[in-house]
Image (cartoon, helix red, strand yellow):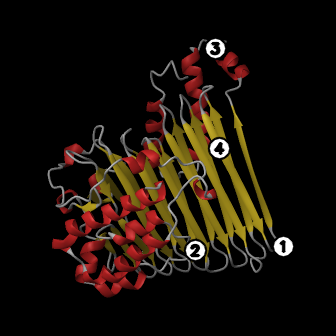
């Protein structure tokens, strides 16, 4: 049996088990989507190092594990089991998903502004199928692969947010995706949908966390649609078990004069990859994508960006920084595509990496594809070590070497943190990053 055949069987086994697990809670409105996805899985190529998008990814360990869709929702989790929140319960709307399924008794989404819907995709499809079906699957322009189709094939629940025209959500929305495994390795596959209509505004914080040393595979897809003049601040914070494997897709479509600012943090997981697809569908829209990843202890972290300028007069900024130590390995693959009609495009892409040990490794590939002739675009990347002169300067002022290195790492990360204009989120991320370097003299 060839590797490709055995790996395709891996997908087929998951689909067969997943269909049985979801049988008692089927959503007929998703049957057609699931059917097409299952057919696509049989036709699409299995990701391998021979494909450019996966050339740095080692999926062998993933395919050697068996993962199962849980048969029943996990209800044993209590509020105290979630270590911390960015906001207090009074300051935000809260939602909790465990292994991809919503847990209402841990959520707090009461007293929403008129017309705003925040909750479970499954619940919305059960009560107002027309609204969800209007938007679900609209962002199909990005390149499909077997993992995104696996998510579609077993689509069952996820986050759903709908903000009507000219409505501002009065409090941040904080979502915790809690993943855990007990006797079996779990496959968590939320499919989330966020829609902001014309002139709508919202702030969304998504956190991907786990309990203990749980071993699982998170395979999530999020669709974002921003109407004309809509504004979304979006923070995605991934800090999962060192046995976890995390793959998430963010597909964003922006209409005229909309504004999106996304900050991505990746610190956890044995293997993690985030793919972000952005397309401008209307002029004078702007998109800011910032990211920070810390990789060590034989971790693998991967960010892929695909920003498509298909209309004139749009602006994009992509700024990602990585701190790699131990035997960690990072990958950054960012592409900006400026199509022929996208005149007056203003786009900048930057990736900077700090290697703290000789065994650390990073592969970085920023790309520009420009087919228009009146644009302002730039891209660049750097890979380097801590400047010994900076260490000497700090030590000459009585600062221990380990503490000096920690300060320089936090200073390196601060350019990304400075883009976070929410004080609570900024302090939360800063504390999380600082904790990574506390007491790690052997690393720093």
Q: Position of residue 252 (x, y in %)?
A: 53, 70
Image position of 95 with respect to 228: above or below: above
Residue situated in front as seen by the camera: 69 or 44: 44
Mark 2 → mark 4, Cα distance in angstroms: 32 Å
* N-term-proximal mark, 1 vs 2: 2
Callout 1 crowding tier (Cα within 10 Å): few <14, some 14–19, many ≥20: some
Say what secondary structure mark 3 lies in.
helix
Q: Position of residue 111 (x, y in %)?
A: 25, 70
Q: Which residue was labeled with disc 3? A: 395
Q: Quadrant of residue 388?
A: top right
Residue in the image at 53% along x and 28% along y: 326
Image position of 307 with respect to 127: above or below: above
Callout 2 crowding tier (Cα within 10 Å): few <14, some 14–19, many ≥20: many
In this orientation, does residue 14 appear? yes
Residue in the image at 45% along x and 58% along y: 248
Q: Position of residue 9 (x, y in %)?
A: 37, 61
Viewer-nearest of discs 3 and 4: 4
Residue 310 placement, left or right of 407: right
Mark 3 → mark 2, Cα distance in angstroms: 48 Å
Q: Give the number of the disc on residue 258.
A: 2
């Amino acid at each position: 049996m060839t590797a490709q055949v055995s790996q395709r069987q891996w997908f087929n086994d998951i689909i067969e088990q997943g269909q049985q697990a979801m049988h008692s809670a089927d959503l007929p409105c998703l049957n057609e989507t699931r059917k097409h996805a299952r057919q696509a899985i049989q036709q699409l190529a299995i990701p391998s190092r021979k494909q450019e998008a996966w050339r740095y990814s080692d999926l062998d360990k993933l395919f050697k594990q068996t993962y199962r869709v849980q048969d029943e929702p996990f209800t044993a989790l209590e509020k105290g089991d979630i270590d911390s929140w960015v906001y207090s319960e009074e300051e935000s709307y809260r939602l909790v998903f465990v292994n991809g399924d919503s847990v209402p008794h841990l959520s707090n989404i009461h007293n929403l502004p008129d017309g705003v819907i925040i909750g479970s995709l499954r619940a919305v499809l059960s009560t107002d199928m027309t609204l969800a079906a209007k938007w679900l699957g609209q962002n199909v322009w990005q390149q499909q692969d077997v993992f995104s189709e696996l998510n579609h094939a077993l689509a069952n629940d996820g986050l759903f947010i709908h903000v009507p025209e000219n409505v501002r959500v009065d409090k941040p929305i904080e979502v915790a995706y809690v993943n855990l495994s007990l006797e079996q390795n779990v496959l968590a596959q939320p499919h989330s949908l966020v829609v902001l209509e014309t002139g709508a505004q919202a702030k969304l914080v998504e956190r991907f966390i786990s309990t203990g040393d749980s071993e699982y595979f998170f395979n999530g897809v999020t669709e974002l649609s921003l109407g004309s003049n809509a504004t979304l601040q979006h923070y995605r914070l991934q800090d999962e078990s060192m046995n976890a494997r995390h793959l998430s897709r963010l597909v964003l479509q922006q209409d005229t004069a909309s504004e999106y600012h996304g900050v991505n943090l990746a610190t956890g997981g044995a293997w993690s990859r985030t793919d972000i697809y952005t397309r401008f569908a209307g002029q004078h829209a702007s998109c800011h994508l910032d990211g920070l990843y810390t990789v060590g202890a034989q971790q693998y972290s991967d960010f892929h960006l695909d920003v498509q300028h298909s209309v004139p007069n749009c602006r994009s900024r992509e700024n990602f920084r990585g701190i790699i130590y131990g035997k960690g390995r990072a990958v950054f693959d960012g592409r900006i595509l400026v199509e022929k009609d996208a005149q007056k495009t203003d786009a900048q892409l930057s990736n900077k990496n700090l290697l703290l040990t000789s065994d650390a490794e990073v592969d970085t590939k920023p790309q520009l594809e420009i087919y228009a002739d009146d644009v302002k675009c730039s891209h660049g990347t750097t890979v380097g070590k801590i400047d010994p002169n900076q260490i000497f300067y700090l030590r000459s002022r009585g600062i221990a070497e380990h503490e000096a290195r920690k300060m320089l790492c936090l200073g390196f990360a601060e350019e990304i943190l400075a883009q976070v204009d929410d004080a609570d989120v900024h302090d939360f991320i800063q504390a999380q990053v600082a904790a990574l370097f506390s007491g790690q003299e052997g690393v720093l």
